[in-house]
Image (cartoon, rainbow, N blue to C red):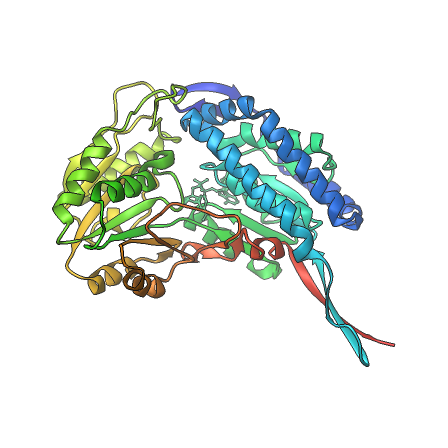
Amino acid sequence: MKIFNPASGEVLTELPEDSTESVLEKYKKLKSAQPSWASRSIAERVACLGRFSDLLEKEKDQLALTLTSEIGKPLKESYNEIKGARDRIRFFLEKSEQYLQDEWIILDGGTREKIVYEPHGVVANISAWNYPYLVGVNVFVPALIGGNAVLYKPSANASLTGLHIQDLLYRAGVPKDIFEIIVGRGSVIGDYLLELPLNGYYFTGSYQTGKHIAEKVASKLVPCQLELGGKDPVYVMDDVERIDDVAASVLEGTVYNNGQSCCAVERIYVHEKIFDEFVESFARQMKELKIGDPLDDKTQIGPLSKIEQRGFLLSQIDDAVKKGATVLSGGKVMSNKGYYFEPAVLVNVNHDMAIMQEESFGPVVGIQKVSNDDEAIRLMLDSPYGLTSAVYSSNFDRAEQVMKKMNTGTVYMNCCDRVSASLPWSGRGHSGIGSTLSYHGIRAFVQPKAYHIRG
Ligand code: NAD
């Protein structure tokens, strides 16, 4: 399997892909070793993941360089991602014992009752490429701490990072027969994972793949948790104070990681009273973004991670323009070698256009004018996705009326594109089922057993 550098379009290296035979072998090994891992104390498992976090810090220079070379994100964003992953791991290290220990419900009387949290067994962690450390640690860290063995399938586009992760976990003390990586393309070797009798499927990726996985594993009746895409809206009310600052914040949510974030801002609604001023500021700041070599410290926008994404973004822009949209800036493939694409902002958009309905997963966004909060709410809700939504306002009560009505797993006021380890990360509708992070994301990897004890 060829691994490309998106900044040059050249082959970085080639990796051997797993075969169905090698995957089956790995599965059998995990299956027989998992009970011994589960029998270790939680503290012992936590300590292994603590050492993994220390190694991430110690080797961050090499890890960040690899991440940038295979994904194309600016090097400083790669460092940020590794730091962010360590923050999340710290949450799991500090909180897991509290949420996994036996819970006595009734301690005395005729029948004592308690809840014990047991691992599922061998679980699959099928992962996306856009934040391989972040979406990876959301799953394999609590899964391992919970006593599961993990069959980890990173995206083919993040295979080198996946191999680093495996190496660091082994060096941290996670046994080799408790964590195994599968290298290969999703549609080939990923699909084979769905045939195996695994005890749980934890998937991060697109709606299309998530739906396929859910359908294929449904008859196994094991947990199938899906963290999928989004078409996340922002509404800017007319009472915001500093429009330039608001535009800067929304722009960052639109273009960070080149818009290749599940919770990137993908639709913007602005109150008509401030529409022109907001659009002028947003477009001006977008034009000022420094696009270039991801290894350059000043670069804010690197290449897209996948070459085919350029054609997809162009087709969304083309569809919008044909239906009456105006491109205010960007929207073109750049001539540099590598997968560079100018971030684009469009106005005169509406919900007949794919750009306001389908996930773009790139640095393009439409801004639509609204005349009041009700219209904004109606448009924000007009999507099959339900990951995040945001409101910018100087009035909490007014913003809260909007946040309460959103059918999304996360709502933001005066911020966007943000994840906290202590809060559940969950989608609704086409954005998925189940939660990672927070205590929900610790308990997602264990099953409760009820004890009724007499005598
Ligand atoms: P994808 O669906 O193409 O692939 C995700 C993973 O599934 C990869 O490891 C891939 O190899 C594997 N896969 C593909 N086909 C498979 C099959 N038939 N059987 C088993 N596995 C298969 O998604 P992607 O391009 O890697 O990631 C981008 C998507 O992920 C976007 O939609 C983005 O919004 C979403 N995402 C969501 C979150 C979240 O937390 N909600 C986080 C990151 C990314």
Q: In screen coordinates, is 427 left or right of 61?
A: left
Residue at 58 percent of width and 49 percent of height: 194
Query: Compared to 321, does 448 lie above or below?
Result: below
289 vs 120, left or right, is left
312, 433: nearer the viewer: 433
Residue 47 percent across, percent down from the top left: 72, 40
Q: Eyeballing the image, is 445 above or below 328?
A: below
Q: Is residue 7 visible?
A: yes
Q: Nearer the viewer, residue 79 or 327?
A: 79
At x 21% / y 44%, what residue is drawn? 243
Residue pushed farthest right? 455
Q: From the viewer's perspective, is residue 216 above or below residue 242? A: below
Q: Position of residue 208 (x, y in %)?
A: 42, 49
The spot of residue 310 in percent (x, y) is 30, 32
**Quadrant of the frame with the C terminus:** bottom right
- Whether residue 348 appears in this view of the structure is no
Q: Position of residue 426 (x, y in %)?
A: 47, 55
Count of marks placed on residues:
0
Query: Does 195 sit left or right of 76 as displayed?
Result: right
Asked if residue 253 lies left or right of residue 221, the reply is left
Residue at image position (58%, 56%) is: 439
Give the residue at x 21% y 55%: 239
Considering only vertical position in the picture, is 398 above or below 334?
Answer: below
Question: Which quadrant would residue 304 be assigned to in this image?
Answer: top left
